[in-house]
Amino acid sequence: MTATLRVVLDQVANPVELMLADASRELTLALIATAPRGCEVEAIVPSLPAAQRDAVAEGMPGLADVRWAPLARRELATAFQLGVATGIGGGMIHSPTLFAPLVRHDRVHDNDQTVVTIWDLKPWETPDELPRAVVAWHRAMLKRAVKHADAIVVPTHSMADRLSELAKVGDRLRIIAGAAPTGFGVPTDEVGRRRELGLPEGFVLLSGGAAASDALATGFGAISAAGLDTPIVVIDAPEGEEPAIVELASAAGIPERLVHVRGSLSSADRGALLGATVAFVAPSRRTAFPWRVVEALAVGVPVIAADSSVHADVVLDGGVRAGGRGDTDAGEDAAMLGEGLKRVLDSAAAVEKASVLSADRGRAFSWREAAERVWQLHAEL
């Protein structure tokens, strides 16, 4: 008898999960590759026009089947939020996000089980930075998960602790980290890609937008405190926020000519950027999985990160963690991050040591290992 794991693939449509489309695909491919004997993987996908459906299956070779929901993404999200029957429940369901049919089911007698994943607590910690509808959806889905999910996956122990403060999740939390895209690295055409993006060589890299929780002001302050007169590249900036980001840099004393702001980039372009990055600065303290930090570690870029609980879990000894844990203000954090940045870039030997430690830590993250742990979780359930 074949056991089928049904993975819910979300057509990402909200600011919290913009980085999760690739992660969902990576996990699904890894689940296919690691499927135990007698097991297979199906995908559950919101309804799409017929012309777009073939691309889903073609992009994930090895799927046993693709099951199309009767509703498009927006309508399906609403149905999930309200607990309306959608006809796609039942069986062994795993969702790489909160996007899942969280309804009453019988795990003991019918072997039905539903597992969801939370990567970012922004809707609870800084809700004012998101549209109200997005916050309402996530909070409603967490309530449904508390009531109906058989397990809730989070990527770090610190996030598990924080989520336990927000909701009565009991002993259903499981820790399974994400990873950089499979095969992620600096591409052979890195120079050409950077040239097409209009970017210089040898820069400090940041990620995020003008939202306070992204802490770009602290990051710029750290670079200024380090006394660096080097280009700065910011990626993942929401559309239209470029002027606000440049203004944050100017307020930290950084000339506009040194700041280069870009939006979402492909994994190959991000790899090309990291090939010319002298250091990655991660100033945010938000309880969220730091995808770009993990990518920097994967290619051995020195990481200077805020000493948050999440970075303690993820960076560990693979980078420099600086600043207080909530008991210091932004100015003090910037000064301490700046000192760490200056120390890392102080000499060629220091850079080499930081690169080696970063690459060593980066090898700890693997989608294959994550998939194996997902299979184990569902077997235990």
Image: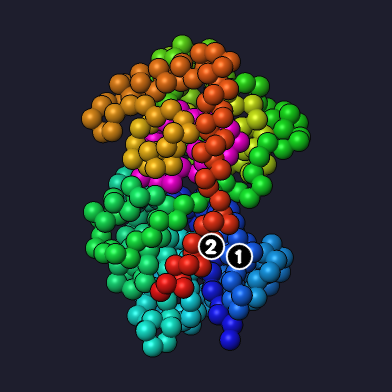
Membership of 202 in magenta stretch: no
Quarter of the C terminus within the rendering = bottom left
Whether residue 240 is visible here, answered yes or no, is no
Give amino acid for label 2.
Glu
Residue drawn 54% across and 56% down? 369
- State how the image is colored: rainbow
Q: Position of residue 44 (x, y in %)?
A: 55, 72
Q: What stretch is highlighted in magenta?
A: 283-305
Q: Position of residue 109 (x, y in %)?
A: 38, 88
x and y, in percent, of residue 165 in the image: 23, 54
Residue under the image location 55 percent in, 21 percent down: 351
- For disc 2, the marked residue is 372
- Label 1, residues with CA under 10 Å away: few <14, some 14-19, many ≥20: some
For the residue pair 294 and 38, the one nearer the viewer reads as 38
Type of amino acid under label 1: Thr
- Circles 1, 2 touching at the beta carbon (< 8 Å): yes
User: Residue 320: where, in percent of width, then height?
Assistant: 43, 27
Q: How far apart are marks 1 and 2 (CA)?
A: 6 Å
Do we see residue 349 in this rendering? yes
Q: Is mark 1 on a helix, strand or loop?
A: loop
Residue 25, above or below 199: below
Front position in the image: 93 or 209: 93
Residue at 26 percent across and 64 percent down: it is 170
Would you say residue 296 sits in the magenta stretch? yes
Q: Say which label, 1 or 2, has the lower sequence index.
A: 1
Position of residue 265 in the picture relative to residue 302 (left or right): right
- Per the rendering, the mark at residue 3 is none
Residue linked to disc 1? 34
Quadrant placement of the N terminus: bottom right
Mark 2 burial class by Cα count in 10 Å: few <14, some 14-19, many 20+: some
- Is disc 2 placed on a helix, strand or loop? helix
